[in-house]
Image: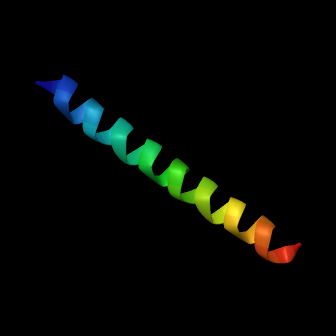
């Protein structure tokens, strides 16, 4: 079942993108 592996990889990528976005937003607010 390669589909499950692909979903896991995709989920991790989305999670890291979301975390990076949150950190970026927090940094923007802190620098202002």
Tell me which corner region of the image, top left, top right, bottom left or bottom right, holds residue 5: top left
Tell me, what colour scheme is on the image? rainbow
Q: Position of residue 13 (x, y in %)?
A: 44, 45
The residue positioned 48% from the left and 53% from the top of the image is: 16
Location of the C terminus by quadrant is: bottom right
**Which residue in the rendered view is the most extreme toward the left?**
1
Q: Position of residue 27 (x, y in %)?
A: 73, 70
Q: Residue extending furthest bottom?
A: 30
Q: Nearer the viewer, residue 32 or 8?
A: 32
Counting from the top left corner in percent of width and height, residue 14 is at 45, 42
The image quadrant where one finds the N terminus is: top left
Q: Is residue 14 left or right of residue 25?
A: left
Locate residue 10 relative to residue 32 in the image: left or right.
left
Q: Residue 11 sits in which quadrant?
A: top left
Identify which residue, 12 or 21, lies in the foreground.
21
Above or below, 27 against 7 in this view is: below
- Residue projecting furthest to the right: 32
Above/below status of 16 relative to 6: below
For the image, the number of numbered tags is 0
Q: Say which residue appears at 62% left-offset and 54% top-offset.
A: 21
- Left or right for 2, reference 17: left
Q: Residue at x 62, y 65 (%)?
A: 23
Vertical arrangement, residue 24 with respect to residue 6, above or below: below
């Amino acid at each position: 079942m390669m589909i499950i592996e692909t979903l896991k990889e995709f989920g991790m990528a989305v999670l890291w993108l979301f975390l990076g976005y949150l950190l970026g937003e927090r940094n923007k607010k802190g620098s202002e």
